Image (cartoon, helix red, strand yellow):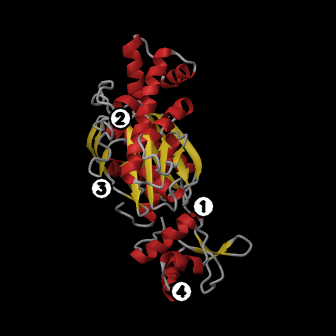
Amino acid sequence: MTSWLPLSPAERSVAIEVLVHGPLSRTELARRLGLSQGSLTRLTKPLIESGLLVEVTDAGGAAARLGRPSQPLDVLADSRAFLGFKITADMVYGVVTTLRSEVTDRLDRPLTTRDPDSVADLLARMTAELAARHPAPAGIGIGVGGHVRDRAVVGESPFLGWRDVPLAALVRDRTGLPVVVENDVAALVEAETWFGAGRGLDRFVVLTIGAGIGYGLVLGGSRVPYAEEGRGFGRHWIVDPHGPLTPDGQRGSAVSLLTIPSIEYQIRAATGGDARYEDILAGAAAGEPMASRVIDEAARALGTLVAQIANFAMPRKILLAGEGVGLMDVAGNTVRETIRAHRHPQAAPVDLETKVSDFHDWARGAAVLAIQVLVLGLTEA
């Protein structure tokens, strides 16, 4: 990979602004960053010379010419390819993205063993297959459910049964490519902040429901890291102290009420039979009593959680994502009624956006982490 590093903090701010919001004229870019034209020219010159930024011609093409202030600045999104992987308990989902995180290819493989070396071997094989279709990828991002240290070591992952696994080194040794590893929710939050629902917002929240519950807070346009990240958010957030008790959460916690495994567990405990989440939602929509009760409790829990987040974090938008968001299709009215009941009567309505996402969105988030770290040198949130 042709290196664009190191970038000074000022150069990085210019590059990020164009990457996220471009193409931008120099006048607009200087206004956004509070820079003089002279300072902007000094900062953009090395970025253009390195090929990170280009000048867009009137015809829509791009040419790296200096000293043309009328030409907007942009990035060549297709100039680099990035690989993103999301590891679940039984699958690895892979994507290829451009420099602006547009997904251009996908590749999924079953995870037949959770042995770290075997998982690294599988990632290397998937990398080779994708690299054959998209030559010279710039780097790899990997998202894992769990706690990750230094964007390299999986400190703890209950889904995989891992502790202190140096995943970045294992994959780097097998592929020869730079590798970034991060908690999957953190990666998704970064992707939505830069290129999705949170772009341009100073206060933004991502709440995910699925196999677990994920939470990400953005303040001042940057994700806020926290020590408990990836360690089971929601397991001790008590929504209803008289609510259900499941193997994976305290009684009445957000996890016990809202996650897919917990909802399936509640139906199994009540009926003695197994039912998939999608079938439970369908049953609730059709008025089946047990499914309706469980889904209604989940909807009220979600509404309470969203209202509490809105009350304390005061975000301009809350994005609800994850494989469990089908709950909104069946019980969205209950969610919204509960939100209103837990908010001040004169409070502004919560801007709640629902994103029907799959695991490729999580993989795309991992690729965005690779873009941030490998291209721009962002080592901290």
Residue furthest out toward the top: 272
Residue pointed to by mark 3: 150
Farthest residue, direction bottom: 38
The residue singled out by tag 2 in the image is 254
Choose between 350 and 87: the one closer to the eye. 350
Q: Between disc 2 and disc 1, whose residue precedes?
A: 1
Q: Earlier in the sequence, mark 3 or mark 4?
A: 4
Residue identified by numbered label 1:
78
Q: Give the left or right position of residue 119, taking residue 130 as reference.
A: left
Q: CA distance from mark 4 to mark 1?
A: 28 Å
Q: Earlier in the sequence, mark 3 or mark 1?
A: 1
What is the C-alpha distance between the residues marked 3 and 4? 37 Å
Mark 2 vs mark 1, foreground winner is 2
Image location (x, y in percent) of residue 302:
43, 36
Q: Is residue 337 above or below residue 44?
A: above
**Mark 3 residue type:** Asp
Q: Which residue is mark 4?
A: 37
Residue 3 percent coordinates (x, y):
45, 69
